[in-house]
Image (tube, rainbow, N blue to C red):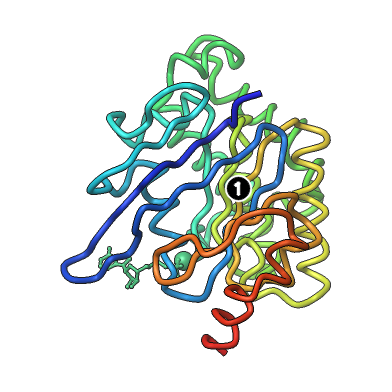
Amino acid sequence: MPPLLTIDRVSLAFGGVNALTDVAASVADGDITAIIGPNGAGKTSLFNITSGFYKPASGTVMFDGKDLLPLPAHARPKLGIARTFQNIALFAGLSVLENIKLGAHAQLKANAGTASLYLGPAAREERDVTAHIENNILGFLNLSEIRHRAVGGLPYGVQKRIELARALVMQPRLLMLDEPFAGMNANERLQMATYIRRCVTESRTTVLLIDHNMETVLGLSSHVVVLNFGKVIAAGTPDHVRTHSGVIDAYLGAA
Ligand SMILES: Nc1ncnc2c1ncn2[C@@H]1O[C@H](COP(=O)(O)OP(=O)(O)O)[C@@H](O)[C@H]1O
Ligand SMILES: [Mg+2]
C-alpha cells in the first residue's frame, strides 16, 4: 500500500536560515509516525508546510495521491487532515465543550461540503455537532464529567487532551500532533500515549506526531524520522534510530 503522506525533497529557508533541506519522509496508513529532533531542527516547519501555512522553496507533499502544496490551508480538513499546535491555543474562560465546539465550527465553515455528509443540513448543524461531540468525543477522551468546567482552571495535561478532542471532531484520517507531550509529567504522558494509541486502534486514524525527546516516542511509534538542523539524519524503526550514531551525537550535542 502506498504511504498516506509522502514528503519529498522539501526545502524551506527563512532569510539566511535553512529551516529544511531536501527533507523526505513518509507516513504509512494506520501507523503512528514520529518526527523527533532537537529544538530548532525544523519539525514544526514541516508541519506548517503540510498544513499549508508555509510554502516550501521546492519539493512535494502528497496526501492519499493528491498534491497538497497548491491547495490553500483550509482545504486540509476537508481532505481529512487535522492538527494541534505546539502551544496551547484554548479560550481559558470558556468551557471544555464550548472550546471543542468552536474548534469544530472553524473547521465546519471551511468544510461545509464534507460536514453535511455526516452532520446533516445546515440548520441541524449546531445540534448535531454537539451530539457528535457528546457521544463520540467526550467519552472517548474521558472529558464528559468536566465538559462544563472552564478550561483555564484545568491541569495542563487535561488542556492538551482538549486540544486533541478539537482535532478529532472532524474524524480526520491524518492526525498531526505538535509536541502532544510537552510540559507533561510522567503520568500525563502515559495517559496521552494511551489516548493516541486508541485514536489509531478504535478510530483508524493515522498519526504523525512531533517530539523533541526521543524516549517519549520510542515505545509509541512504529516509524521515527530524525531531523537535525533541517536535515533528515536517520529514519526507521525506534530500535534503528535509538542506536544510530548520528542520532546519539545530535542529542548529545543538543544536551
Ligand atoms: N516563521 C518563521 N520565521 C523565521 N524563522 C523561522 C520561522 N519558523 C521557523 N523558523 C526557524 O526555522 C528553524 C526551525 O524551526 P522549527 O521548525 O520551529 O523547529 P522545531 O519545531 O524543530 O523546534 C529555526 O531556526 C527557526 O528559528
Ligand atoms: Mg516545534
Q: As drawn, is 49 to the left or to the right of 114?
A: left
Front residue of 25/201: it is 25
Q: Within the image, what quadrant is residue 217 found in?
A: bottom right
x 72%, y 69%: residue: 242
Q: Position of residue 22 (x, y in %)?
A: 36, 53
Q: Position of residue 136 (x, y in %)?
A: 75, 32
Counting every numbered tag in the picture gives: 1
Q: Within the image, what quadrant is residue 240 found in?
A: bottom right
The amino acid pointed to by label 1 is Leu
Disc 1 under 8 Å from ligand 1? The reply is: no
x 78%, y 50%: residue: 195
x 29%, y 49%: residue: 54
Query: Where is 105 relative to 253, above or below?
Result: above
Front residue of 149/220: it is 220
Q: Is mark 1 on a helix, strand or loop?
A: strand
Label 1: few (<14), some (14–19) or many (≥20) C-alpha neighbours in 10 Å: many
Q: As drawn, is 155 to the left or to the right of 193?
A: left
- Can you say which quadrant of the picture contains the C terminus? bottom right
Q: Where is residue 33 in the image (x, y as percent from the top left)?
A: 65, 49
Q: Position of residue 247 (x, y in %)?
A: 60, 73
Q: As drawn, is 164 to the left or to the right of 143?
A: left
Report the residue marked by disc 1: 208
Front residue of 194/170: it is 194
x 52%, y 46%: residue: 25
